Image (spheres, helix red, strand yellow):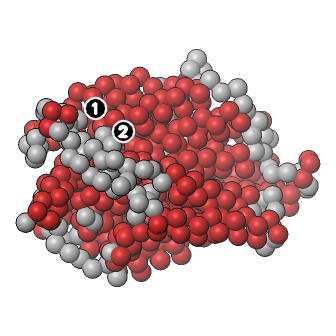
Amino acid sequence: MSTATTPADPAELDPAAPASMSRKEVMQALSGLMLGMFVAILASTVVSNALPRIIADLKGSQSVYTWIVTTELLAMTATVPLWGKMADLYSKKLLIQLSLGLYVAGSLIAGFTPNVEILIVSRAVQGIGAGGVTALAMTVMAAMIPPRELGRYSGVFGAVFGIGTIAGPLIGGLLVDTSWLGWRWCFLVGVPFTLIAIFLLQKTLHLPVVRREVKIDYLGAFLITAGVSCLLIWSTLAGSKFDWASGWTALLVSIGVILLALAVFVESRAADPIIPLKLFRSRTITLTILASVFVGLAMFGGTVFLSQYFQISLGKSPTVAGLMSLPMIFGLLVSSTVAGQLITKTGKWKIYLVAGSLVMTVGMLLLSRIGAHTSVLVISLYMAVLGIGVGMLMQNLVLAAQNDAEAQDLGATTSALTFFRSMGGAVGVSALGAVLAAKVTDMFTEKFGPLPGGGDAAVPDLKTLNPAILSIVQDIYGKATAELFLLGTPFAVLALLTVVFIKEKPLHTLSGNDRLAAEQQAPMH
């Protein structure tokens, strides 16, 4: 049977892996895990401020800008469930090292890319690696640490996330503005640190390996990937390459829905499904997954284009654009850390989901008011509000779901949340990116006449524009970016309505490993 489970012989397990890890051992393991997560975040965020310069140098359009972001999200989203499933079956340590290795490969390809086409391929490789790191980091933490204590460590995790997110745009901006380095080093700079993280994980991460005879559901994985890809391709191209209400829309949406329906059918009959449908029997897991989709749609859809807004609409350098992201990151960092400590102290977590989604909605509404002449101080305040809301919400959705899941399904549960949040983010980026490209093109056409060839407006190089045209271009990008946050606000409201219906349950006091041992022994008594 493909579901047969046999615990590994003790000799086969890592001799350093006890049944329950001590606090010192947990902290040692977390050191390698946190560094791995840090370099993955750094490799992802370091490019954000460089993209306008990269696209201008490689002669790309606004649609290409969107594709470079969307491709990584698509690859990450499509592979997260597979990584999560493998985490329940194979060595989590080996898998997270493999995912970091893929990130290294993608970074090297991107660093030496000759054109935007190869750059998009490299982003896909990076996305596959990011899918592994994203799915496995919280799974490994849940295996070592009880949910009641996880809030404290999640605060540290949030701090690492914040520092990596802060450092990335700043380092990227400095590299772009340094003539003898340039944007290619945005991809290459993280490679040595990623290799160090792989080495540290080898030395510090010790988890028991439960060996199971399994049959990976490759058909289900293919159908999920193909179905999601169809919907993302549709949401990226609609509005620019064809109308939202068109034959192409009907075709791509129909194919995507049919493939996903087939995926549900296959998963319901698979011995080891990629996403176990039994997860959706839990009201808490179902609602946290739904909320994660809305968070992805709301947050990623708008914030990914903020760096472009800073540089084009406000005329800031890549370095200054990196500094301007600090208020949102500090808001996220502080609220994530404080909420984590309070959850560990009180055991109460739902209030932070409700408050976080409410504050996130307010932040989205405030950012829908920005323009080419909005002051940096006002924008910083708006971004801090959004960061505070996201910090209270995102990490604690994972905590609530992990607390409700069976220990044997921790990997699948964590990856399901990550998958649906990433899918929401990918759809948000691609759909709102298409809206941005169409809006910018329409306004360019209105101001300057039909574009050559009737295509999308190219991302402008501000240094080549005279002052009169520059002012018009900055106003166009300011109005278009504000509209993205207005379109994303209803999804933040839906996230708020969803978390209100989540029922608060006491947090477990046993780690995932201890709960798994108890679950395996239960039938014997």
SS assignment at label 2:
helix
Disc 1 marks a residue whose amino acid type is: Leu
Q: Nearer the viewer, residue 23 or 436?
A: 23
First in sequence, mark 2 or 1: give its number.
2
- Residue drawn at the location 26% of the way across and 73% of the way down: 350
Whether the residues at callouts 2 and 1 have beta carbons within 8 Å, the answer is yes
Instruction: Report which quarter residue 13 is drawn in.
Output: top left
Q: Is residue 262 visible?
A: yes
Left or right: 478, with 90 as reference point: right
Res 338 quadrant in image: bottom left
How far across and how far down the image is residue 520, in percent?
Answer: 17, 58
Q: Give neighbour class at mark 2: few <14, some 14-19, many 20+ (Cα, 10 Å).
A: many
Q: Quadrant of the C terminus?
A: bottom left
Label 1 environment density (alpha carbons within 10 Å; few <14, some 14–19, many ≥20): many
**Horizontal side, residue 283 vs residue 454: left or right:** left
Q: Residue furthest top?
A: 180
What residue appears at the point 23 percent right and 77 percent down from the top-left corner? 504
Q: CA distance from mark 2 to mark 1?
A: 9 Å
**Which structural element holds mark 1?**
helix
Q: Which residue is mark 2?
A: 96
Which disc is residue 355 wearing?
A: none
Whether residue 475 is visible to the viewer of this picture, yes or no, is no
Name which residue lies at 33% across and 43% down: 90
Residue 201 got which mark? 1
Residue 76 rendering spot, x and y as whole percentages: 51, 48
Judge left or right: residue 18 versus residue 516: left
